[in-house]
Amino acid sequence: MTGLGQGKFGTLALPSAAGYTLNYMVQYGSPPLDLTFAALSDATRRGIIDQLGRGDASITSLADKFHMTLTGMKKHVEVLERAGLVVTQKVGRVRTCKLGKRGLEAEAEWIEAHRKLFEARFEALDEIISEMKQEGSDD
């Protein structure tokens, strides 16, 4: 096997006869950024965060608001809990949800760093296009 690249996510390798094979991420955990972005990738979960930003709510009231079953809402809340975005407390038969104390600072920093990267690349591309247009007009 000839290794084509070694990186954080595994090795791309070319076996002798069978074609290309990817050695996928081995035992890759779920760091907080992954859990947060996965949790926020769903419109319902973003809606739950918005709703809890207005005040605490029971799972029953959230299920009613989003026209879902209790089981469906519990699953959404569990995803948000794993990401640390929501905490729940059960008193008697009522499970109340509220926003977690963990903010989104790390996620905001990641987004901002990548926004700057994209911005710099687009500016460089704009410069190249401008130069090409200028060279084209000189002819």
Image (cartoon, helix red, strand yellow):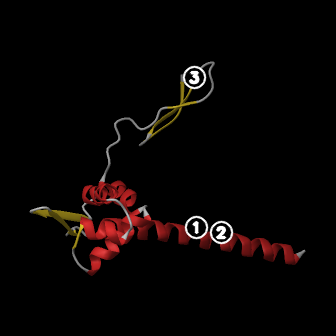
Mark found first going from the N terminus, 2 or 3: 3
Nearest the viewer among 66 and 99 is 66
Instruction: Point out residue 78 in the picture as x, y percentages from the top left corner.
Output: 27, 56
Residue ID for mark 2: 125
Label 2 SS: helix
CA distance separating discs 1 and 2: 6 Å
Distance from the alpha carbon under mark 2 to that under mark 3: 37 Å
Task: Give residue 133's mark.
Answer: none
Spatial CA distance of label 3 from label 1 is 35 Å
Q: Are marks 1 and 2 in contact (CB under 8 Å)?
A: yes
Q: Nearer the viewer, residue 114 or 87?
A: 87
Residue drawn 39% across and 63% down? 40
Q: Is residue 73 left or right of residue 94?
A: right
Kind of residue at disc 3: Pro
Instruction: Give the mark, 3 or 1, whose residue is nearer the N terminus.
Output: 3
Q: Position of residue 27 (x, y in %)?
A: 34, 36
> According to the image, label 1 marks what residue?
121
Answer few, some or many: residues within 10 Å of disc 3's Cα (few below 14, many 20 plus, some between 14 and 19): few
- Depth check, front residue: 87 or 20: 87
Q: Which residue is mark 3?
A: 15
Q: Determine contact: label 3, label 1, CB under 8 Å.
A: no
Q: Mark 2 is on which residue type? A: Leu
In the image, taking residue 113 as reference, residue 134 lies left or right, namely right
